[in-house]
Amino acid sequence: MRKSYKIEVDCANCANKMENAANNTEGVKKAVVNFMALKMNVEFEEGANPKTVMPVVLKNCRKIESDCEIFGI
């Protein structure tokens, strides 16, 4: 399953770090962050529930940028 989320992030470097954090989250098969579009596209591992995975992704991303936001989770 793939989903797209609107994100709020301050800089391209932080967006890259957030992408790495998302990719290292259990349940995420692949995540791509587009800083210019302020979007995060996430492909979930088979059987993973986006409603339980995405709050963990947000928590991991906030370790990089405390005021980042992922909308629609």
Image (cartoon, rainbow, N blue to C red):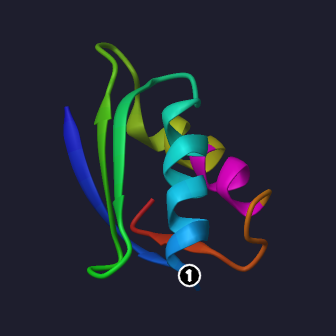
Q: Quadrant of residue 66?
A: bottom right
Q: Seen from this angle, which residue lies furthest left?
A: 1
Residue 7 is inside the magenta segment? no
Q: Nearer the viewer, residue 73 or 63?
A: 63
**Residue at the image position 57 percent from the left and 74 percent from the top:** 69
Direction from residue 25 to residue 1 in the image, left or right: left
Q: Seen from this angle, which residue lies furthest front?
A: 13
Residue named by callout 1 = 11
**Residue at the image position 57 percent from the left and 69 percent from the top:** 13
Q: Nearer the viewer, residue 36 or 49?
A: 36
Q: Quadrant of residue 31?
A: top left
Q: Seen from this angle, which residue lies furthest top?
A: 46
Check the image and report above or below for 47 versus 52.
Answer: above
Point out the stretch of residues depicted in magenta.
57-62
Across and down, in percent, residue 45 comes to 34, 19
Check the image and report above or below for 63 versus 11.
Answer: above
**Residue at the image position 49 percent from the left and 75 percent from the top:** 12
Tell me the SS state at disc 1. Answer: loop
Direction from residue 5 to residue 3 in the image, left or right: left
Across and down, in percent, residue 48 comes to 39, 22
Q: Residues within 10 Å of mark 1 (few under 14, many from 20)?
A: few
**Residue at the image position 33 percent from the left and 14 percent from the top:** 47
